[in-house]
Image (cartoon, grey):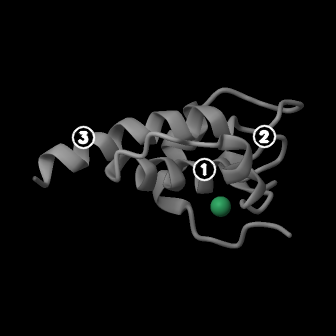
Amino acid sequence: MACKKDHSAIQDIMADLPLDQGGKGRHKCAACAYEKGFEAGKELEEIINLSEIFDSLEESQAKNQRHKSPHSAFAQRYLDGVQAYYDNR
Ligand SMILES: [Zn+2]
């Protein structure tokens, strides 16, 4: 299954992520991983299983998230989520 979400708002961010063509997150949608990172960060989630999270994601061969590292996407956005947690207290 391929991701059909509209990730047009974050294409500049996706363009800057490192390439990951053969790693553990192979072909998983890095843009969806980015969103998951924010969700985890704003809940201050401490037990995070990236393997399970990536298994739940659709694959993507589309746009700037194509072949980009979902690990990098998740980690980058996790920090934004943590910041949002503290900003919203
Ligand atoms: Zn996606």
Disc 1 secondary structure class: helix
Going by the numbered disc 1, the residue's amino acid type is Ala
Residue 25's tag is 2
Residue 87: x and y in percent read 13, 47
Going by the numbered disc 3, the residue's amino acid type is Gln
N-terminal of the pair, mark 2 or mark 3, is 2
Residue positioned 58% across, 69% down in the render: 6
The residue carrying pointer 2 sits among few (fewer than 14), some (14 to 19) or many (20 or more) residues within 10 Å by Cα, namely: many
Residue 77, quarter of picture: top left
Disc 2 secondary structure class: loop
Q: CA distance from mark 3 to mark 1?
A: 18 Å
The residue carrying pointer 3 sits among few (fewer than 14), some (14 to 19) or many (20 or more) residues within 10 Å by Cα, namely: some
Q: Are marks 3 and 1 in contact (CB under 8 Å)?
A: no
Residue positioned 51% across, 34% down in the render: 75
Q: Are marks 2 and 3 in contact (CB under 8 Å)?
A: no
Going by the numbered disc 2, the residue's amino acid type is Gly
Residue sitting nearer the eye, 67 or 85: 85
The residue carrying pointer 1 sits among few (fewer than 14), some (14 to 19) or many (20 or more) residues within 10 Å by Cα, namely: many
Residue 83's tag is 3
34, above or below 9, in the image: above
3, above or below 81, in the image: below
Q: In the rendered image, which residue does mark 1 sit on? A: 33
